[in-house]
Amino acid sequence: EIVLTQSPGTLSLSPGDSATLSCRASQSVRSNFLAWYQQKPGQAPRLLIYGASSRATGIPDRFSGSGSGTDFTLTINSLEPEDFAVYYCQQYASSPYTFGQGTKLEIK
Amino acid sequence: EVQLVQSGAEVKKTGESLKISCKGSGYSFANWWIGWVRQMPGKGLEWMGIIYPGDSDTRYGPSFQGQVTISADKSISTAYLQWSRLKASDTAMYYCARHGSVSAGTNYFDFWGQGSLVTVSS
């Protein structure tokens, strides 16, 4: 089973800042089969990024994903108030398709 | 428009059985995998398993194998998650989500249901 470790656990930033969230895998993620999701309180998760770097439909271009192998990054430029949420990475290269433990992005 | 609508909140006692549902619309239900994700109170997301309604091919995460049953009825575009004997530790929010093709490498969750809260007490 591939274990995903996200860092930091909590990130405190202000609107207008840029955020960098990390996701590290315990073994190489084949074909960069890595997705990112956003979850706001009381809501279901929402797909942001798939294939490590492809934005899902309707996702603003301030969200970008990068990385390969075992190290992946979600970058959010010019944070908007609605971006403060919990973010999860997920690998879908090897069943079970595990999630990271999440990074909480909070307003400073 | 793709929609997944889940059944409502449930309050059950330990040892009871339960089946929750997820009805899909706006796409060809039989031709897309559907998955279930658990979120325990204040915790992260856990991948439980997936089913292909077209032929009922089912895969389980190791932590959930033997603990739950995933099924689907393609004639009514509905997937199910069921327990035969609930435990207090089953208390959680459960989400269904559409899951892309494993063979095509698009097997991430692109559309999600609103969640079904299951509370189990003694």
Image (cartoon, rainbow, N blue to C red):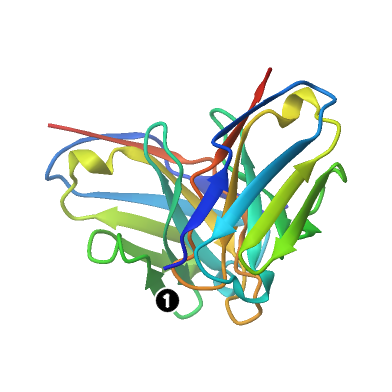
Mark 1 belongs to chain:
B
Q: Who is closer to the viewer here, B44 or A43?
A: B44
Q: Is A59 situated above or below B53?
A: above
Which residue is at the front of the view, A17 or A33? A17
Q: Residue at x 51, y 51 (%)?
A: A5
Q: Residue furthest top?
A: A108
Residue beneath disc 1: B56
Looking at the image, residue B84 lies above or below residue A27: above
How many numbered marks are there?
Answer: 1
Residue A99 visible: no
Which residue is at 76% across, 58% downward? A66
Residue at image location 77% in from the left, 44% down from the top:
A75
The answer to whether residue B25 is visible is: yes
Q: Nearer the viewer, residue B108 or A6?
A: A6
Q: Quadrant of residue A92?
A: bottom right
Relative to A27, is A73 on the left or the right? right
Q: Amino acid at mark 1?
A: Ser
Q: Position of residue A33 (x, y in %)?
A: 64, 68
Work out whether B103 lies above or below B84. Answer: below
Q: Helix, strand or loop at disc 1?
A: loop
Residue A28 placement, left or right of B1: left
Query: Which corner quadrant of the image does residue B97 belong to?
Result: bottom right
**Which of B112/A45 is in front?**
A45
How far across and how far down the image is residue B79, in percent?
Answer: 44, 60
- Mark 1 Cα shell of 10 Å, populated few (<14), some (14-19), many (≥20): some
Residue A80, position in %: x, y? 81, 27
